[in-house]
Image: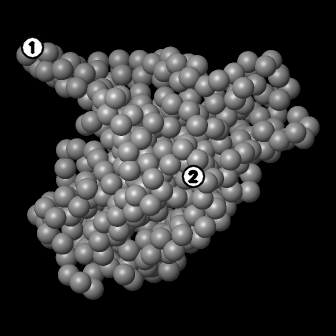
Amino acid sequence: MIEFVYKLASSTLATPRTAVTVSLAGIVTIMLVGIFSPNYNTLPRVPDGTNLIAILLPLSGHLGRMPDWASITLTFAAIILQCIGLAGLLWANSRGWKPNPRHLFYASCVIVAILVSITPVGSSDTTSYAAYGRMANLGFDPYNNGPLATLGPGSPYTQTVGNMWQNTPSVYGPLATWIQQFAALFGGKSNPAAAVDVLMILNGLVFLGVGYFLIKTADDPVRASLMWVANPVLIQQLVAGGHLDTYVAAACVVGIQIARSRTSGWRYLLVGAAIGVACCFKINAGLVGVGLGWALLMKREWWNIARLAVGGLGTVLLFYSYYGLHSFKQVMQASSLVATPSPWRAFQLAVEWVFGLFGAEKTGQALSTDVISVTWPVLMVLVAVLIYRKFGADQPVVVTVPFALCFAWIVVAPWALPWYAAVAWVILALVPRNPMTRWLTLVTVYLALMHCSGGGPATWANGT
């Protein structure tokens, strides 16, 4: 396998023209899936295959719908092309290709402008966002009940939410909820597609904003651009999928770059605030804060650890106080979920089967859940240490330690989805070429192949 990769790295694929062509082919293919919607890989999808309310953005739905077998085939093909194209781009860069990062940024602007006008592909999350926003606008607490209980089965918002999530309260932070509320204003009572369109546009702007920030602040703007704004894998997962992880990555990279600055130690109050803002979108951003604290602990910078904690916890408490502690309830419950592609799922099924032989399947379920809950965080730390050791001593620990922890979480956590890798990608874009790029690409693409149904009822392809 390694020899095969080395052969590809020295092949025509590593030339700029071929790499760009393959990358664009992967992006255009996923555009076609979204344009010919609704289908299996776009939202919504209900058990009998009919669509109650179609989410058709401006460039979708005009040319008819695509058969499910075709959308599945094209989506898988697109992901593979994106992976190969990204590898080619990075190989070409390592062989001396230095494209103008501004040109990459402008090209990405065109691609993003098109994608935010196409029905989201690969996940039903954007309709959940719209539903939570509608709930909040009506005065319902999105952290207490799911869309079905509050909006009712007849609401267009409820009908477009993935079946697995109609009874699920929000797992997102208050800043995410406020953005969802803003978008839902455009959808009003009966037009969730308009809310989704606004969410897609805002998310695309944030994605481009991160790309521009990296051009201005990264040590190697060319590599950073190839890793983020020109990365076909991320363009699909974050822009075409419309996921909030873009916001998380944005706040985290700002915090890390502030930490790398040469100003006084008081900057760690701002670093903590930036990470706190990220946590107010998705709480998993706390891993970056823990990573930064770990890096400071290695250097015994006690006062900076305290400043980081005050800035981060203070920001989280400030925003979460609007809803109260119960807003963490669903996050805690979701932490026990196990995704089908995860090795933890095989362990879970094995334990349940053994106990089922003795008529104690529920006991087996409880035991497997408890074992997984205790074991995976320990393994995450061990894997993070191994990843950290792959970096040279000359690399800044405020970058490599948070990356190691975030990447280890994606690898080890029982519930991992491809868009969760956004934070790891944006952090890795700050350091020179290293072996972790290869592994992060493979893990992200593997997860993408496993989770790309558009929220349909498939044992291997649900997402939130």
Residue drawn at the location 56% of the way across and 33% of the way down = 434
| Foreground residue among 458 and 131 | 458
In percent of the image, x 73 and y 18: which residue is there? 298
Mark 1 neighbour class, 10 Å CA radius: few under 14, some 14 to 19, many 20 or more:
few
Q: Is residue 49 left or right of residue 197?
A: left
Determine the residue positioned at 25% across, 56% down: 77
Measured as percent of width and height from the top left, residue 149 is found at 34, 60
Which residue is identified by label 2?
97
List x then y, in percent, for residue 82.
37, 54
Q: Tell me the kind of residue under disc 2.
A: Trp
In the displayed structure, 444 sits above or below 338; it is: below
Horizontal and vertical percent position of residue 152: 31, 67
The residue that label 1 is drawn on is 358
Give the label, 2 or 1, closer to the camera: 2
Q: Please state which amino acid type lies under the numbered disc 1.
A: Phe
Secondary element at image label 2: loop
Which of the 4 image quadrants contains residue 265? top right
How far apart are the alpha carbons under marks 2 and 1?
63 Å
Q: Can residue 409 be seen?
A: yes
Identify the residue at image location x=13%, y=21%. Answer: 353
- Can you say whether 373 is above or below 215 in the image? above
> Nearer the N terminus, badge 2 or badge 1?
2
Tell me the quarter of the image containing the N terminus: top left
203 over 363 or under it: above or below: below
Q: Secondary structure at mark 1?
A: loop
